[in-house]
Structure formats: C-alpha cells, structure tokens
Image (cartoon, rainbow, N blue to C red):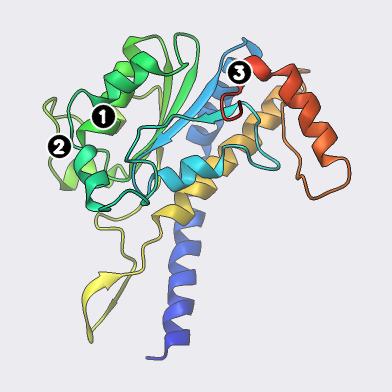
Amino acid sequence: MSDRQLGAQFFDAAISLLQRVRDEEAEAVEAAAALLADTVAEGGRLFAFGAGHSSLPAQDVVYRAGGLALMNLLVVPGVVGVDVMPATLGSALERVEGLASAVLDTAPIGAGDALVVISLSGRNALPVEMASSARARGIKVIGVTSVAYASETTARNPSGTFLKDHCDVVLDSKIAVGDAELTLDTVPAPFAPASTVVTSALLQAVMATAAGDLAARGVEPPLLRSGNVDGGHEWNTRIMREYGDRIFYRR
C-alpha cells in the first residue's frame, strides 16, 4: 500500500468520525452552546482545560480569530501541551491527586462560570477532579471525552469514576480506545490518531452555535477578528476593553 493510500484512508476515517459526531452529538452541541451562551449573558466567565494533547483543542478556542473572546485557558503548569521536559512528566502529573483543587483555588474562576474539560480517556485523576471540584464550586462543566473508555477501560483515580460522570453536558468524540485509526500488516502497532481533529471540530461547532444563540437573544457575541485583516486590531481593542474583566490571557 502506498503512502498516498494511507493518507487517503486517514482522511476517510476522520471524515467518518466527523460525520458521526455531527449527526449523533447535535443535541449535546446545542446544550453545550446554550450553557456557554447563558454564562456569557449572565456575566460569567468561560474557561477551557485539557492536559497533554487534550490541551490542543482547548488552546484552539482561546484568543482565536472568529472565536469567543471570553474563552480563557485554565493553566495547570506542566500539563498544558507537550513542551514540558521530559514529556512523560505531563502524563505523570495528570495522575496526581489534589492538583486540580489546588489550581481551582488559585485560578480566577468561580460560581457562575463555565469550564470545558477535555480528556480523551476521562479516566485520570486530574480531569476527573477538575470537573468534580469545579461543580462543587458552582461552576458549570462541559466534558469532551470518548465515552467508550468508560466501558472498555478502568478508572485511574480514587473515585472510580470517569470525566463523563461529573459534567452538566457531555460531548462524545466517538474516538476508539487507543486513538489510532489505521493498521497495517507491516506496522506492529495501530497508528494515525484522530482525536485532535474531531475534538477541535466539536468545540468549534459549540462556539459557532453559542455565537448564534447569543445573537438570537439580542446579545452581541463577543467575537474576535483576525489581526491580519484591516480593522481587526481596532475591533479586538474594543472587545477587550468592553469585556476586560472577563479576559485573563492578557496583562
């Protein structure tokens, strides 16, 4: 099989997953968008969190041209992205108990706010405690995860639960356990992960729906424009000024 055929197979697998989440998660997307729109309209703040590669979709909705300006990244040192050295430290920190509560104690998030928690497996201590601790503080939680892990793996945290068990809304990415879409006789392990593609698309669908929801209520969605188009910087300066008390990714 040629490399080109493998590339096409990956595209086909990703497209199939995107079609599944479009069709099967439509109600959940609308519910998540309504939760975010409610939070914005009521003066609340928006945050997104993910560890390791699950941080990539979280970062994709923060300070994003065409995205909601109020979406902030909830940062846990050492687990956001894969730039920590060694990279395996990030995976280890995701299993540390109590870390989520310590972060929430010091972050500018509280009752009346909304938090998106992204974890493909949803089984480790950090995302589970992040969701459960946030809800205990009166924060609404949207979880983005693969529900399949809850039935095909065991929880890896003291509560014995999964991320999906601690959310107001759950978005199921439909990613198979192991996050690898392709196999080949000459390759000893499955390969080609699609979770980032699908999770990012799910979240962008939520953001788009939330913007439309706000507009339908007569509320101007606080959207950012690209700084690379004429008038973009001026537009963003106005948005940052109007919503400055709810934006935390700038000094």
Mark closer to the observer (2, 3)? 3
Query: Taking the image as drawn, is residue 166 in sight?
Result: no
Q: Residue type at mark 1?
A: Val
Q: Nearer the viewer, residue 237 or 184?
A: 237
What secondary structure is marked by label 3? Answer: helix
Instruction: Mark 1 and mark 2 in contact? Answer it, CB < 8 Å.
Output: yes
Where is residue 218, by image quadrant? top right
Q: Mark 3 vs mark 1: which is more N-terminal?
A: 1
User: Looking at the picture, does residue 14 appear above or below residue 114?
Assistant: below
- Looking at the rendered structure, which numbered label has been put on residue 128? 1
Residue extending farthest to the right is: 230
Write the residue at 77% across / 32% down: 236
Q: Mark 2 vs mark 3: which is more N-terminal?
A: 2
Residue 24: image x %, image y %?
Answer: 46, 44
Write the residue at 66% across / 30% down: 69
Q: CA distance from mark 2 to mark 3?
A: 34 Å
**Label 1: how many residues lie within 10 Å, few (<14), some (14-19) or many (20+)?**
many
**Label 2: how many residues lie within 10 Å, few (<14), some (14-19) or many (20+)?**
many
Q: Residue type at mark 3?
A: Arg
Write the residue at 27% across / 38% down: 122
What secondary structure is marked by label 1? Answer: helix
The residue where tag 2 is placed is: 155
Q: Residue type at mark 2?
A: Ala
The residue where tag 3 is placed is: 246
Instruction: Mark 3 and mark 1 in contact? Answer it, CB < 8 Å.
Output: no
Q: Nearer the viewer, residue 203 or 111?
A: 111
Query: Taking the image as drawn, is residue 145 in sight?
Result: yes
Q: CA distance from mark 3 to mark 1?
A: 25 Å
**Number of residue marks:** 3
